[in-house]
Amino acid sequence: MNQHNSPAILRQAVRSGEFSGNTSGCTPGFVQCNLTILPADWANDFLRFCLANPRPCPLIASSNQPGDTGLPLLGDIDIRTDVPSYRIFRDGELAGEVADIRSHWRDDLVVFALGCSFSFEEALLADGLEVRNVSEGVNVPMYRTNIDCSPAGPFQGKMVVSMRPFRAADAIRAVQICTRFPSVHGAPIHLGDPGLIGIGNLDLPDYGDAVTIKESEMPVFWACGVTPQVALEKARPPFAITHSPGHMLVTDLRNSQLAVL
């Protein structure tokens, strides 16, 4: 899949089964979203969890009504087919990964689309910074931390972060750039020693792929939209669906529409 294809073309490739990979580096210029889908009677508490934790869970869009399969604000989308890989959770436990969720769809389900760090990668690249997961052609490394999220109803848990390595001067520049994008996680939450946020080994990410960290570089960590999956484990709703880490919903919304100037 050519990364310069439009969001609509990429979603069609996902829908047809032609594309099933991670979406890092795909469709530059357009917003990518994390996904959480829950029964309606769990939706209000999850919405409160997002509002209480805007760094890891920046809400971009949600269903107009339970059972809606489209997100008109984000494009001509069928949420049942347009994400490259989905995770199914039952009672808070991962029950499997699937290529589409048509056979799992229910009329009481509510969709939440959350901002994704893949969106700000474009701004980093445009400024001449290397984004290692893009240059190495792998999924971004993601780690569970010891940072508590603010609870809301049954939803609670530790924050997940994504990591990209930079030299010190470039890390400062990355902070400046990403501060302009609060809707896609904003500025990093931690720089340097991963042990301070409970990460034991950068070579063993909890999600995604390890990347090269050069001797002159430090790890830089951003709040990550996989955090709701940890919250699902704690809340244990009877049924939930998310994206598989790194496999995002690519939308027609432009990154520039989210920037704070």
Image (cartoon, grey):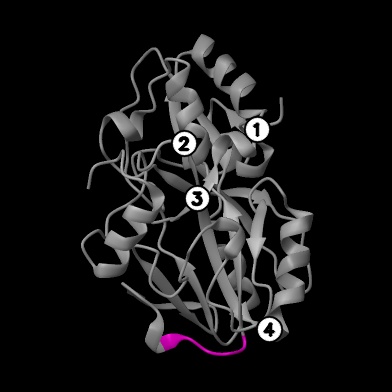
- Name the residue nearer the viewer: 159 or 139: 139
Q: Which residues are magenta?
A: 104-108
In terms of secondary structure, where does tag 2 sit? Answer: loop
Earlier in the chain: of badge 4 and badge 1, it is 4
Residue drawn at x 23%, y 67% as measured from the top left: 17
- For mark 3, what is the residue? 252
Seen in the image, is 194 located left or right of residue 190? left
Q: CA distance from mark 4 to mark 3?
A: 26 Å
Mark 4 crowd level (few <14, some 14–19, many ≥20, 10 Å Cα): some
* Type of amino acid at the residue the image marks with label 4: Ala
- For mark 4, what is the residue? 40
Q: Determine the image quadrant of residue 108.
A: bottom right
* Type of amino acid at the residue the image marks with label 1: Ala
Location of residue 20 with respect to 42 vertically, above or below: above
In terms of secondary structure, where does tag 1 sit? Answer: loop
Earlier in the chain: of badge 4 and badge 3, it is 4
- For mark 2, what is the residue? 29
Q: CA distance from mark 4 to mark 2?
A: 32 Å
Seen in the image, is 125 located left or right of residue 21? right
Q: Determine the image quadrant of residue 149.
A: bottom right
Is the residue under label 3 in contact with that under label 4 (CB below 8 Å)? Answer: no
Tell me where residue 3 appears, x and y as whole percent: 29, 40
Q: CA distance from mark 3 to mark 1?
A: 15 Å
Q: Nearer the viewer, mark 4 or mark 3?
A: 3
- For mark 1, what is the residue? 259
Q: Is residue 218 visible?
A: no
Q: Nearer the viewer, mark 4 or mark 2?
A: 2
